[in-house]
Image (cartoon, grey):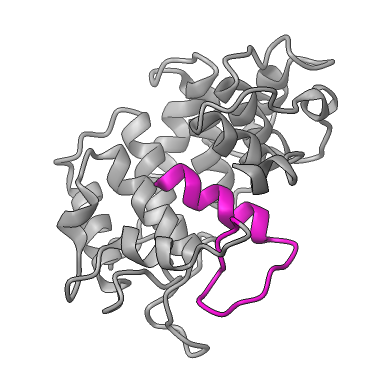
Amino acid sequence: ETYLQSHSNSPWATMALSSLNSTNIPSDYLKNISGSSAIDYEAPILAITALNKDPKTFGTIDYVAKLKSFSSSGQLGDPSAFNDDVFGILALISAGLPPSDSIIADSKNFLLTHQNQNGGWGFAVSSASDSNTTASAIVALVAAGVPSSDTHIQNALNYLKTAQNSDGGFTYDPSSQYGTDSDSSSTAWVLWALNSLNIEHGAWSKNGHSPDDYLQNNQTQSGYFQYQLGSPEDSFSPITTAYAVIAL
């Protein structure tokens, strides 16, 4: 919590601090959000609603209306990407819109109809699957009303299992030629998916190591979570730490 308080001017840090029931969470930076794409508004909306504030009135403009303005052709934002549909669903639902809202329903169907054959999703429509996009898609689909028993969800979980290593953690891409070691961000996202489905983390232990064990082993004495064991602190460390805190 102390580490995040010292790196608090990001939506993910705000969400993580909120999950810890922190007090005096900085939020003024969220009052003047501007951007040219849907993704620019989605994490800020999630941060605002994590603070129990209304993103329609918290800033200088109605962020929900602005986000919805990026909807076109049955999806939200960039038609070649999935992340803006995933976080768009989550942002709009967190802002109080029902799953039946046409933009949420369109983004949900966009995800469902573009699932890869191996059960996962990649960053782009044409990309190979990765654990982060797949896990976040599960969270969004569940929020949008897709039941845990649905074949799309079960196939996605089966894909995530292929990304788990013997240390209990998860890699970004189990087929990557650049390395398949576990990392904190991927592990945290998988835990978010398990949380959304009310699956106990221990049920996904491997060789006696749970995903929680992997994450906790990556926390430093300074408070931040290393991306991988031995990784130095960098500009993304506060985000990695926020992901881990929310997951745990």
Q: Nearer the viewer, residue 5 or 141?
A: 5
Q: Nearer the viewer, residue 36 or 184?
A: 184
Depicted 54 relative to depicted 175: above or below:
above
Which residue is at the far top? Answer: 57
Depicted 125 relative to depicted 173: above or below:
above
Q: Position of residue 82 (x, y in %)?
A: 52, 51
Depicted 17 relative to depicted 193: above or below:
above
In the rendered structure, does residue 128 fall within the stretch colored magenta?
A: no
Q: Position of residue 76 (x, y in %)?
A: 59, 37
* Left or right of 92 on screen, residue 247: left
**Bounds of the magenta span?**
223-248
Tell me the residue at 69%/40% (across/down). 5
* Left or right of 124 on screen, residue 153: left
> Which image quadrant is residue 8 in?
top right
* Left or right of 218 on screen, residue 69: right
Tell me the residue at 75%/44% (across/down). 6
In the rendered structure, does residue 238 fall within the stretch colored magenta?
A: yes
Which residue is at the far bottom? Answer: 177
> Which image quadrant is residue 162 in?
bottom left
Q: Position of residue 228 (x, y in %)?
A: 52, 74
Tell me the residue at 49%/42% (across/down). 86
Q: Position of residue 25 (x, y in %)?
A: 69, 27
